[in-house]
């Protein structure tokens, strides 16, 4: 186990209950997807894991106590969230720079992650010179540059076209196999969650809670062949069914 | 596809206003000659040009006075405006306490404040204060807005990586504020000149001063209208050069990343 949420609730200052009694255990090496309708608290759960929001009730338990857990995290937002005034190289440098690592000392690792995401030739490019998919790759490289144990991703590919999304799905699986990090991934897409995940956590809204956990047992790393397999179709059916149950419970939708 | 507008050089943007200028000047010259208007009512452009050359030593030294006031006022406004904007983003309390006064200073017309300042301060200090006063506010408000405009997710990211307040300010907020700050600088630069001129006029009527605006008031008293026009021309050219320089400077700084400073490629 890396981290566990135990009975975590979150009520915002304006009275919105975003999460109610959510429990989730993240094991090392897992790829967990949080899947659910808009407003069910997926982003809130991720932000609580990252320490960007505090829980109103419940506990967040880390495997190791007494260390700075944030140092072991990477976070990828839905938008690439790059600094427009900095090159791809300098954007990836940021997490290390904030920890006091000089450009020269950081350079080998920055080169390595930019190569890993396929942007070896784009060190000097500014964000505006990159396509949406390339910007997202920079964002992923930035999250990986600190060698995080846990990568938190909030709908990272939602704004991309399907072809780019499929490519980035495969790249993400390859990177996970190479670097060995654990992923908690928020998505709206049943297909994307089945393709990527070892476990899918289906959530419902009002209040945000977990309604089902579905393991996807297909061995990893996975390849495009999985997308057309019977096992994939079966898993999609099961997950869709669970998701429709979750949406059906919400008559505000 | 039509050629896109370029920020640097564009025939339409330069030739048409220039042609219009030449036509207006020519018509002015012809009209004054034909209608035989006396030069102490309306001088011909050629007479204004001749005066500009003949009186150049006096006008130029006056220009230097005004320009130096303008630049000093702008420099002080930069320090004050940016400094206060940074204080505002670091402390809500300071912002709430001081912002109303910044607004009051701004909405009170400088022409009305100038005579008061001239009572309490030596004339150069009063003129400088007026230049500072009008340049300060646009720099303050634009920079404050810019410092607050930093992307929220990027701020979260800085938090995630344990960035200190100063790291956030230096690596994120100041950079994000740069385009806003430069807008404030452009406005402030031009306003600083206006503030200096307004104060010089107020001081001039009180009988002291040597800036360009003072020359204008003086020429008016002496009915030396050609010199008035010459001083006015010099003042306008100064304002234009100042604005062009600040625009060029701002484009240079933003060239690599900001959309407003880029050509759209088609
Ligand atoms: N800062 C906040 N203040 C008040 N309410 C909030 C805040 N952030 C989120 N909420 C509310 O909490 C609920 C859960 O929000 P959250 O962003 O976690 O949902 P989500 O599952 O990520 O939705 P989506 O799929 O649309 O991104 C929503 O009803 C939202 O309006
Ligand atoms: Mg969300």
Image (cartoon, coloured by chain):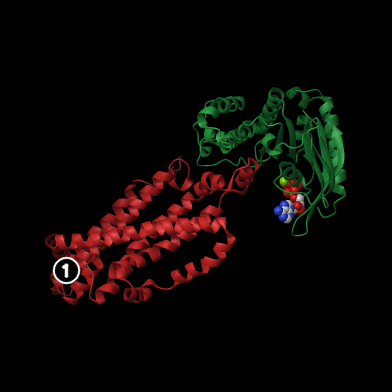
Query: What chain is the green one?
Result: A
Q: Is B212 left or right of A4, judged from the image as shown? A: left
Q: Is B123 left or right of B49, judged from the image as shown? A: right
Quarter of the image where one finds residue B16: bottom left
Provide the secondary structure element on which disc 1 rests.
helix
Quarter of the image where one finds residue B192: bottom left
Q: Which chain does the residue under circle 1 lie in?
A: B
Q: Residue at x 15, y 72 (%)?
A: B224
Q: How packed is label 1: few (under 14 Cα within 10 Å), some, or many (20 or more)?
A: many
Q: Is residue A73 visible?
A: yes
The relative height of residue B212 versus residue A163 in the rendered view (above or below) is below
Q: Residue at x 69, y 46 (%)?
A: A52
Q: Which residue occupies the extreme front position in the image?
A: A66
> Which residue is disc 1 drawn over?
B226
What colour is chain B? red
The relative height of residue A160 versus residue A229 in the rendered view (above or below) is below
Q: Position of residue B223 (x, y in %)?
A: 16, 75
The relative height of residue A99 versus residue A118 in the rendered view (above or below) is below
Q: Position of residue A211 (x, y in %)?
A: 87, 43
Q: Position of residue B34 (x, y in %)?
A: 14, 70
């Amino acid at each position: 186990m890396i981290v566990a949420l135990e009975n975590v609730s979150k009520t915002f200052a304006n009275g919105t209950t975003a999460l109610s009694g959510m429990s989730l255990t993240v094991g090392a090496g897992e790829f967990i997807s949080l899947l659910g309708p808009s407003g069910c608290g997926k982003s809130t759960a991720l932000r609580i894991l990252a320490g960007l929001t505090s829980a109103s009730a419940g506990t967040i338990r880390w495997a190791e106590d007494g260390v700075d857990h944030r140092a072991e995290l990477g976070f990828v937002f839905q938008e690439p969230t790059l600094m427009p005034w900095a090159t791809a190289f300098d954007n990836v440098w940021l997490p290390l720079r904030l920890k006091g690592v000089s450009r020269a000392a950081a350079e080998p690792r920055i080169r390595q992650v930019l190569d890993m995401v396929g942007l070896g030739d784009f060190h000097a490019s500014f964000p505006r010179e990159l396509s949406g998919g390339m910007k997202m790759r920079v964002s992923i490289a930035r999250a990986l540059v600190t060698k995080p144990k846990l990568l938190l991703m909030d709908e990272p590919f939602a704004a991309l076209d399907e072809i780019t999304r499929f490519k980035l799905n495969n790249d993400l699986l390859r990177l996970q196999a190479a670097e060995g990090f654990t992923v908690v991934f928020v998505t709206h897409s049943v297909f994307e969650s089945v393709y990527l995940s070892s476990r899918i956590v289906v959530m419902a809204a009002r209040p945000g809670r977990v309604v089902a956990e579905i393991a996807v047992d297909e061995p990893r790393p996975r390849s495009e062949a999985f997308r057309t397999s019977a096992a994939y179709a079966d898993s999609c059916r099961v997950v869709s069914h669970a998701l429709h149950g979750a949406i059906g419970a919400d008559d505000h939708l | 596809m039509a050629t896109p507008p370029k920020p640097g050089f564009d025939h339409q943007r330069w030739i048409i206003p220039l042609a219009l200028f030449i036509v207006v000047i020519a018509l002015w010259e012809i009209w004054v000659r034909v209608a035989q208007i006396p030069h102490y009512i309306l001088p011909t452009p050629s007479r204004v040009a001749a005066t500009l050359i003949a009186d150049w030593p006096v006008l130029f030294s006056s220009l230097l006075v005004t320009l130096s006031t303008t630049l000093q006022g702008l420099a002080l406004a930069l320090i004050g405006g940016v400094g206060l904007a940074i204080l505002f983003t670091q402390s809500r309390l300071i912002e709430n306490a001081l912002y109303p006064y910044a607004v009051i200073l701004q909405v009170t017309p400088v022409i009305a404040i100038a005579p008061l300042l001239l009572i309490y301060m030596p004339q150069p200090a009063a003129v400088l204060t007026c230049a500072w006063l009008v340049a300060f506010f646009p720099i303050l408000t634009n920079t404050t807005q810019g410092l607050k405009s930093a992307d929220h997710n990027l701020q979260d990211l800085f938090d995630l990586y344990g960035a200190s307040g100063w790291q956030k300010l230096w690596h994120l907020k100041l950079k994000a504020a740069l385009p806003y700050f430069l807008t404030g600088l452009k406005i402030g630069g031009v306003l600083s000149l206006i503030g200096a001129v307004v104060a010089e006029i107020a001081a001039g009527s009180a009988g002291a001063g040597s800036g360009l605006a003072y020359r204008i008031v003086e020429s008016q008293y002496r009915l030396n209208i050609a010199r008035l026009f010459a001083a006015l021309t010099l003042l306008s050219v100064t304002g234009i050069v100042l604005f062009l320089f600040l625009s060029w400077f701002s484009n240079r700084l933003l060239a690599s990343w900001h959309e407003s400073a880029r050509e759209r490629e088609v």
